[in-house]
Each structure stands twice: as structure tokens, then as C-alpha cells.
């Protein structure tokens, strides 16, 4: 593995494309072959979930390619669009009133663009506090100006929480492109690919392990498949994937394993939080809500990343001083 780090950037890119797209094509062919066979309803549901996870990896890999080919500015714009769509889906799932329109307009057309502008401008100090400090002070004021106290605290908390996950959390993914490490110039896109793979491996591992490892659920009324053992197995799988990919990062193997372990663990808990939110909204199954709420399942796919990316970003920035 050490010799891989010594390769030039172009050689690393070529090797990654061959390996990752080869594996994705193989997995897609196997998934298609599996879809031709007769399945029980439970097997069909698990297969559907696997296809969604596979699709998320494809999207992440293509975003990595675009980030590399077109530069950080275009990649930041693409992530901003994804963030906008995820926030739109989140707001569709939550209860809002006419009095919230000022706050919602501010989130969509002021807070979201400014957060990504700060990321693109590498103003990371302001980028880190803009939403949790300034936006969260202004949004309740705008909602209160609507002169409607009905369920005010609940409405305001949901708007703030959606902003925190869909805008603040997601904006940390393109910000990884712009982190500067010694002897790691022009390779920021690798970190985006790294976190995408770690999160995807953790999610897929959790689905596979949960089928065979039945233990007491952590939160029975939210997700019966998540136990401490399945969480640990998923986090370890994500950590192992991160450890094997250390050569595309500025980290040493133990550092890469530990950081990936933390990010993978956060991703699994992020998925749990999203399930809790959807249960609260009366939605039982992922990706099946389009006809009811207008949602398209995007939030299901990006929620783990929205939880993992900020922890990953601030961990590496704090530890390495990037």
C-alpha cells in the first residue's frame, strides 16, 4: 500500500477509476441478475435497499469525477443543488404554516447560498458558525414576525433542524475539497470519495449484518435492525475501508482507520435519526413516499453523509490543522 501513495496524482486517479468503476459495474450486473430471480417480499425489500445504496455510491463516485474534472467551484455548486433538493424534501415532510414563509425563504435563498459561498471562499471559521450562531438567531425572529404562535417552538425547531442537516451538514462535503494539507495539494477530491466510500460501506455492512445478527435493538420503536453489535460491525467495516484507502489521504493507516470508524459510526446514527423523523411524520418505508408527500427519497440517501461529513471535516481540520 505504501507504494501506492508514491504514485503520481494521475496514476492514482487512473487506478481508482479502474478499481471503483469496475467494482460498481460488477455490483450493478449482479444486482440486475438478482432482480431477474423470484424473491420473497422481504428479499425484495432488502434488494431494493441494496439497489438504493448502490445508486448512492454511483452518484458519489460520479460527483468525485466531476469534482476532479471541473474543479472545486463546480463541485460546490453541485452539492448546493443536492442540499437544496434535500431541504425541499425535508420541508415537505414537516408541518409548517403560512407564518413560516419568511423563515423558509431566508433558509432557501439566503442561508443556503451564503453557506456554500463561505465554503467555496475557504472562510472556514465563519463557515463553521454561520448557521448555528447567526442563522439560528435570525430564523425564529422571522417566524415570530408572522404573528402566529400555534406550535411555534415545534415549527421553529423543525426548520432549524432541517437547516442543520440538509445545509450545514451537507456543505461540509464540498468543503473537504478545499482543505489544505502539507504535501497533499490538488487532492482534495480524494477526501470526498473517501468519505462517500466509508459511509456506503458502513450502510451496506449494516444491512447485511442485520439480516443475520438479531440482537436487542437500541431503539426498538424507530429501527428494529439497529443493535450495538450491528452498529459496531458497520463502524468497523467503515473503519477498515478507510484504513485500506489511507494511500489516497494525508493520513497514516491507524489515523485513517480511526477517523473512518468515527465517520461510519456517525453515519449509522444519522440514518437512525432520519428514520425517527420519518416515523414522526407517519412514513414507514424509505423511498416510498413520493405519491404522498412529494418526496423522492433523496433525503434517505444523503442523511448519513450529512451526519458523517461535519464530524469528519472538523476532526481532520482540528487534528491536522488544515
Image (tube, helix red, strand yellow):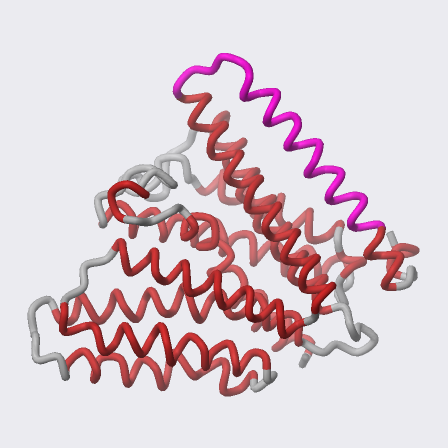
- Dividing the image into 4 quarters, which one contains the C terminus? bottom right
**Which residue is pictured at 37% across the width and 40% down the height?**
286
**Percent from the top left, x then y, of residue 253?**
76, 57
Q: Position of residue 118 (x, y in %)?
A: 53, 83
Q: How many marks?
A: 0
- Looking at the image, which residue is at 67% across and 60% down? 66
Residue nearer the viewer, 310 or 190: 190
Quarter of the image for residue 234 reads top right
Residue 53 relative to residue 139: left or right:
right
- Residue 12, percent from left and from top: 85, 57
Residue 119 sits in quarter: bottom right
Determine whether, in the image, residue 284 is placed left or right of residue 254: left
- Judged left or right of residue 234, residue 91 is left
- The magenta region covers 15-41
Residue 305: horizontal and vertical position, in percent?
Answer: 51, 57
Q: Residue furthest top?
A: 38
The prevailing secondary structure element of the residues shown in magenta is: helix
Amino acid at each position: 500500500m505504501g507504494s501506492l501513495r508514491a504514485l503520481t496524482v494521475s496514476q492514482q486517479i487512473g487506478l481508482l477509476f479502474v478499481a471503483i468503476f469496475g467494482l460498481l459495474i460488477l455490483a450493478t450486473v449482479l444486482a440486475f441478475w438478482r432482480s431477474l430471480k423470484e424473491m420473497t417480499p422481504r428479499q425484495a425489500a432488502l434488494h431494493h435497499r441494496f439497489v438504493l445504496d448502490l445508486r448512492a455510491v454511483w452518484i458519489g463516485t460520479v460527483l468525485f469525477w466531476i469534482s476532479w474534472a471541473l474543479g472545486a467551484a463546480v463541485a460546490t455548486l453541485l452539492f448546493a443543488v443536492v442540499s437544496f433538493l434535500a431541504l425541499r424534501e425535508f420541508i415537505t415532510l414537516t408541518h409548517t404554516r403560512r407564518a413560516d414563509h419568511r423563515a423558509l425563504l431566508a433558509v432557501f435563498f439566503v442561508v443556503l447560498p451564503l453557506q456554500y459561498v463561505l465554503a467555496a471562499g475557504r472562510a472556514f471559521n465563519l463557515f463553521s458558525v454561520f448557521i448555528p450562531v447567526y442563522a439560528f438567531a435570525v430564523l425564529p425572529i422571522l417566524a415570530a414576525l408572522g404573528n402566529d404562535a400555534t406550535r411555534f417552538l415545534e415549527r421553529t425547531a423543525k426548520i432549524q433542524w432541517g437547516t442543520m442537516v440538509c445545509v450545514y451538514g451537507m456543505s461540509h462535503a464540498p468543503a473537504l475539497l478545499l482543505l489544505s494539507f502539507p504535501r497533499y495539494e490538488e487532492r482534495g477530491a480524494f477526501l470526498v470519495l473517501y468519505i462517500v466510500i466509508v459511509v456506503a460501506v458502513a450502510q451496506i455492512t449494516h444491512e447485511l449484518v442485520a439480516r443475520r445478527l438479531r440482537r436487542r435493538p437500541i431503539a426498538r420503536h424507530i429501527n428494529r435492525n439497529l443493535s450495538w453489535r450491528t452498529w459496531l460491525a458497520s463502524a468497523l467495516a467503515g473503519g477498515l475501508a478507510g484504513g485500506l484507502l489511507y494511500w489516497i489521504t494525508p493520513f497514516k493507516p491507524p489515523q485513517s482507520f480511526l477517523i473512518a470508524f468515527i465517520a461510519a459510526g456517525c453515519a449509522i446514527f444519522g440514518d437512525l435519526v432520519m428514520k425517527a423523523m420519518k416515523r414522526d411524520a407517519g412514513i414507514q418505508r424509505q423511498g416510498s413516499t413520493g405519491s404522498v408527500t412529494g418526496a423522492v427519497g433523496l433525503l434517505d440517501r444523503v442523511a448519513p453523509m450529512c451526519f458523517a461529513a461535519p464530524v469528519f471535516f472538523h476532526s481532520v481540520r482540528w487534528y491536522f490543522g488544515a
